Image (cartoon, helix red, strand yellow):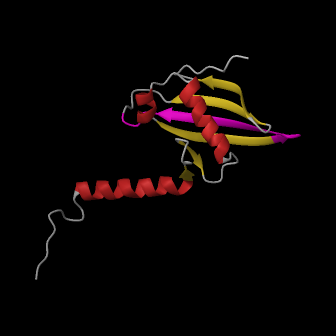
Amino acid sequence: MNATSSYPVTHPRVVRRTAMLALTLWASAGFAAPSDSKILFAHDTPVPPSVQNFAWRVIETRCSYQSFEREQRSFWAFRTHASRIAERVIYSINIVSTLTWKKTEPPAIIEMTVVDDGGMQLTALHSSFIACTLPPG
C-alpha cells in the first residue's frame, strides 16, 4: 500500500508551519504572561505578577494607544530590575512594543519605575513614539 501525502515533508508550506510552531514554543519557554497582563516577562523576572499587572494597567490608562492598537501590538519586558530600600521595593521595567506585521514602524520603548510600599505607585514614566504621561500629583 502506497500512502502519499498531498504535501511532501520538504514542501515550503510544511517547513514554514513547522518553523513557526518551533519559534512559538521556543518563545513561550522563556517568557510568560500573567493572566491580566499582556506584557511578556522572562520566566525568572524579579517583577512579581501583581507589579506586572500594574504595569499593564499603566500602559492601558497612561499611554495614548487606542484599544485596537494595544490588541495589535506585542509588549515585551526586555530589562527589569528590582531593588529594596527599607520597606519599599523599586521596580524598573523597560518594555518594547512592536507591530510585528508592520516593519516600517519603529518599536516604541516604554520605561517605568514602580514603587511597592504596600501599595503600587508609578514614580517615573518615559516613552518613545507614543505619548505616556504620569498621573498628576
Answer left or right for 130 relative to 6.
right
What residue is at 64 percent from the left and 47 percent from the top? Answer: 49
Query: Looking at the picture, does residue 120 appear above or below residue 127?
Result: below
Name of the residue lying farthest toward the front? 119
What residue is at 58 percent from the left and 21 percent from the top? Answer: 132
The answer to which image quadrant residue 25 occupies is bottom left
What residue is at 49 percent from the left and 52 percent from the top? Answer: 27
Instruction: Identify which residue, 130 or 103, lies in the foreground.
Output: 130
Name of the residue lying farthest toward the left? 1
Instruction: Identify which residue, 133 or 119, lies in the foreground.
Output: 119
Answer left or right for 91 relative to 99.
right
The answer to which image quadrant residue 54 occupies is top right
x and y, in percent, of residue 15 in the image: 29, 58
Q: Quadrant of the C terminus?
A: top right
Answer left or right for 129 relative to 1.
right
Q: Which residues are magenta?
A: 84-101
x and y, in percent, of residue 37 in the image: 55, 42
Name of the residue lying farthest toward the top? 136
x and y, in percent, of residue 46 in the image: 70, 48
Name of the residue lying farthest toward the bottom? 1
Query: Looking at the picture, does residue 109 appear above or below residue 64?
Result: below
Answer left or right for 44 relative to 116.
left
What residue is at 58 percent from the left and 33 percent from the top? Answer: 57
Query: Looking at the picture, does residue 72 appear above or below residue 12?
Result: above
| Residue 47 among those drawn in magenta | no
Instruction: Identify which residue, 67 or 22, lies in the foreground.
Output: 67
| Residue 85 among those drawn in magenta | yes
Q: Main secondary structure of the magenta part?
A: strand
